Amino acid sequence: MKISGHPVSALEPFGVRVDAARPGADLGELPVPDLRELVRDHHLLLLRGFAGITGPEDLTGYSEGWGAIGMWPFGAVLELVEHADPGDHIFDHGYVPLHWDGMYRPQVPEFQVFHCVSEPGAGHGGRTVFTQTGAVLRHADRATRELWERATGEYRRKMEFYDSEAVSPVVTAHPDRGFPVIRYNEPVPADADFVNHPDLRFTGLPEDRTEEFHHTLTSALYDPRHLYAHSWRTGDLVVADNYTLLHGREAFTSGCRRHLRRVHVLGSPPLDNPALVRSTTASPSAEGAAS
C-alpha cells in the first residue's frame, strides 16, 4: 500500500507507518483526510523521514489541518522536555503511568500529534507507550472483564495548568463509534519517587478484589499483544487516537536530549468531557500559542 507514492506498512501489535519515499519529502504531500482515516482505523500513525516541521509554529499549522486545536493556557504546543526543577512528572525524567489526555480538561482531544525535536539517543530510554484498549477488552475472559466493568475511577490532580476532578467508568464506550474502550489512570505506588502524585480512588469493587482488579488490568494493558512502545527518532511525527488508546512514558536518562512537542486536536464536533466533575483552569491566550 502507498499514499501519494510513500510506502505504508504495519506496526506491531497495532498502528501503521508511512515512510518518506525519498529523503526529506514534504509532509504536505500526504493528504490529511487519508491519514485521519488511518488513525481512526488503526489507532496510531507514524510518519518517518518527512520534512516540513522545524518549529512549534510549523507543528501548530500542520495540526490545524487535522481539526480544531485544543488550546491550553500556554497555547497550542506543549514542550515535553525535562525541567531542572520539575513541578510535575511530565517535566521530570521518570516514567509516566498510563492515562488518557484531556481527562481533567473541559474537552477531550480526539488526536494527539507528537513531533520529535530531538531523540534521547540509544540506551537512554524514554519510549512513549500506547496500549490499544479495544483489543484489551476483546481478549479478556468474561469473568475478568465483568470485574473491570464494575469499577469507576475517581481522579483528582492539581498542577500548573489546572486543579480538576474527573469520574469515569473504567469500561465505557468510544464516543463516536460505540465500541468498548478503557478509561484508566494507572496508579503509582505511594512510596514511589514520583513528582506530583494524582489522587486516585476506585469504587464499585469488593474490597477483597481491588488488588485483583488492578493486577489483571495492568497486566492486560502492558501485554505485548496490546502495547506498542515507540523509540523516538529526530523528526518522527506520531498521531494517536486518544479516544481509544491509553499512553504513558518510560523513564529516560536525566540530561539526555529527549525533546518532544505535542498538540491536541479536537474531534468534530468537539467532545465535551463526560468525566469532568470540577475544573479550575487558567484561560488560554493567543500569546505563546507556539511556545
Image (spheres, rainbow, N blue to C red):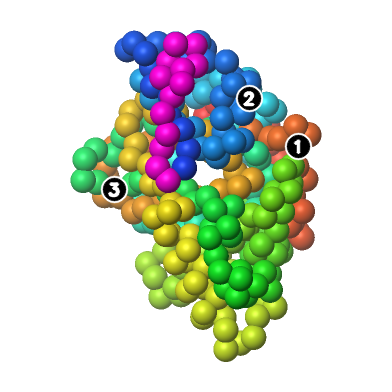
Question: Which residue: 60% across, 75% down?
Answer: 143
Q: Position of residue 234 (x, y in %)?
A: 33, 28
Mark 1, residue position: 270
Observer-nearest residue: 42 or 54?
A: 42
Three-letter code, disc 3: Gly
Q: Distance of mark 2 from mark 3, alpha carbons?
A: 30 Å
Mark 2, residue position: 66
Q: In this view, does 214 lie to the left or right of 69?
A: left
Mark 3, residue position: 125
> Which stretch is magenta?
1-13
Question: Which residue: 46% across, 21% down?
Answer: 1
Q: Distance of mark 3 from mark 1, alpha carbons?
A: 34 Å
Three-letter code, disc 1: Pro
Q: Where is residue 280 in the image (x, y as percent from the top left)?
A: 72, 53
> Pointer 2 and pointer 1: residues touching (CB < 8 Å)?
no
Observer-nearest residue: 93 or 159?
A: 93
Residue 267 visible in the shown view: yes
**Position of 5 relative to 96 (above/below):** above
Badge 2: how crowded within 10 Å, few (<14), some, or many (20+)? some
Observer-nearest residue: 18 or 202?
A: 18
Q: What element carries label 1?
A: strand
Observer-nearest residue: 188 or 160?
A: 188
Q: Position of residue 171 (x, y in %)?
A: 66, 62
Q: Is mark 2 on a helix, strand or loop?
A: loop
Lower position in the chain sequence, tag 2 or tag 1: 2
Q: Position of residue 9 (x, y in %)?
A: 41, 29
> Pointer 3 and pointer 1: residues touching (CB < 8 Å)?
no
Lower position in the chain sequence, tag 2 or tag 3: 2
